[in-house]
């Protein structure tokens, strides 16, 4: 059995075990009380997702964790009506030791994901893990082992899977075959708020624990750019490929029910930002599957692309889908347009809580998170090795 086969069989078994446990949990007296939530990493992403948790009356914030006092204070101020009684800590283990924390949302830099995720599962807590699930391919085994040993819920942060219009498009145009044979998926998304813009060289701010930020990464002196624009550095994240291709590749693979890429090629470079960043600010990738191609284009521009989407070309028509809705254009006939009716983050956070409280299945289980990592890791391998990747070691 190779590593890719190991991924599919092991993840499926872990998901089945957790689904059974969720159903059992719903039958326990008191299981429908408010879910005690802990949040690890209180930055921009956590702020966005916790808007959704704050709207859910079934959720109670009980513990918070961040390595930077200023960021933690800003989070507390923003959610002051919801976190007034939540304990604040610097080290995540203190949060995990709390018996009143039932579920944990993890929104740290990518290089800390697996270390913290395995600790959360080991502490018998339900887990909402931001994407990407992996920072390095070799981390997969530890995460799979922790998930297989746990009976708790695990939701990956790929919120498109909870979008009603995504589900509708999958059923109506892919499962029902209205697109015909899809031969091509084009994924585009440009401009991001995390791009680096003339970040000054300043002393380390008081209350920022640099050693905890670095974690397992190489020990280097503090630089503000490495903290505030960590996605631009290979030690902490994998840039555009991990941040964006993870989302769009998941959409394409989910729609087409094919998560087994055959090969990948990626090119790019530091064409705009320059400086000491180590991830490309512009990248193009082609991922080949058995009978279709996925093209990915992304760059850090000063002007946001108004239409980040996944565009599918089939023998009977095409479909262009975004987070706001989709347009299906048949080969013969008028286009059909559908608008999103709910914020994806609200739907995805709600699905996670439904899984804990009611025993529903999560929409983005570990298997989906790991499968979305495969084309990303293959594209990364191609980019750094300057060759076509056909298998991951």
Image (spheres, rainbow, N blue to C red):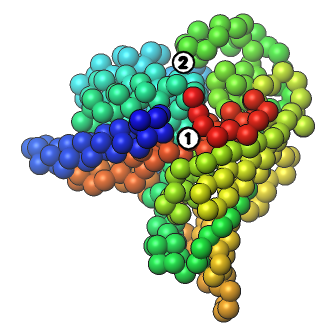
271 over 322 or under it: above or below: above
Image point (41%, 43%), residue name: 8
| Residue 73 in view (yes/no) | no
- In this picture, residue 118 sits left or right of residue 267: left
> Which residue has dot 1 on it?
373
Which part of the image, by quadrant, shows the C terminus? Answer: top right
The residue labelled by disc 2 is 67
Count of marks overlaid on the render: 2
User: Looking at the picture, how far across and down is residue 226, in whole percent?
Assistant: 72, 21
Q: Which of marks 2 and 1 is nearer the N terminus?
A: 2
Left or right relative to 119: residue 391 = right
Tell me residue 57's x, y (percent).
32, 51
Q: Which of 302 and 383 is in front in this view?
A: 383
> Residue 228 or 280: which is nearer the viewer?
280
Of badges 2 and 1, the one in the foreground is 1
Pick out the residue farthest to the left: 29
Q: Is residue 10 left or right of residue 378?
A: left
Residue at 47% x, 30% y is 140
Q: Residues within 10 Å of mark 2 (few under 14, many from 20)?
A: many
């Amino acid at each position: 059995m190779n590593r890719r086969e190991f991924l599919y069989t092991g993840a499926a078994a872990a998901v089945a075990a957790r689904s059974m446990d969720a159903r059992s949990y719903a039958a326990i007296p008191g299981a429908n009380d408010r879910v005690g939530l802990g949040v690890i990493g209180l930055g921009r992403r956590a702020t966005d997702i916790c808007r959704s948790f704050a709207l859910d009356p079934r959720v109670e914030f009980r513990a918070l964790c961040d390595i930077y006092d200023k960021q933690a204070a800003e989070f507390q101020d923003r959610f002051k009506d919801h976190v007034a009684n939540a304990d604040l800590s610097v080290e995540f283990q203190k949060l995990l030791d709390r018996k009143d924390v039932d579920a944990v949302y993890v929104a740290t830099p990518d290089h800390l994901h697996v270390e913290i995720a395995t600790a959360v599962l080991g502490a018998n807590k339900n887990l909402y893990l931001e994407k990407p699930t992996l920072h390095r391919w070799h981390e997969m085994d530890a995460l799979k082992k922790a998930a297989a040993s746990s009976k708790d819920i695990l939701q990956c942060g790929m919120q498109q899977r909870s979008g009603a219009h995504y589900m509708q498009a999958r059923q109506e145009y892919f499962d029902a075959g209205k697109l015909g044979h899809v031969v091509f998926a084009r994924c585009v998304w440009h401009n991001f708020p995390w791009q680096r813009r003339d970040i000054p060289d300043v002393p380390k701010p008081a209350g920022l624990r640099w050693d905890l930020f670095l974690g397992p990464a190489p020990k280097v002196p503090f630089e503000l750019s490495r903290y505030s624009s960590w996605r631009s550095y290979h030690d902490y994240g994998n840039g555009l490929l991990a941040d964006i291709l993870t989302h769009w590749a998941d959409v394409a693979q989910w729609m087409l029910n094919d998560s087994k890429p055959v090969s990948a090629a990626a090119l790019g470079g530091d064409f705009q930002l320059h400086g000491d960043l180590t991830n490309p600010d512009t990248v193009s990738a082609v991922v080949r599957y058995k009978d279709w191609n996925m093209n990915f284009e992304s760059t850090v521009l000063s002007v946001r692309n108004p239409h980040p989407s996944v565009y599918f070309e089939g023998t009977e028509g095409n479909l262009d889908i975004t987070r706001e809705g989709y347009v299906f254009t048949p080969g013969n006939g008028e286009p059909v347009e559908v608008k999103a009716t709910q914020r994806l983050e609200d739907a995805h956070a709600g699905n996670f809580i439904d899984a804990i409280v009611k025993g529903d299945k999560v929409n983005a289980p570990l298997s989906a998170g790991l499968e979305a990592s495969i084309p990303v890791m293959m594209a990364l391998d191609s980019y750094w090795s300057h060759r076509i990747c056909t298998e991951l070691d």
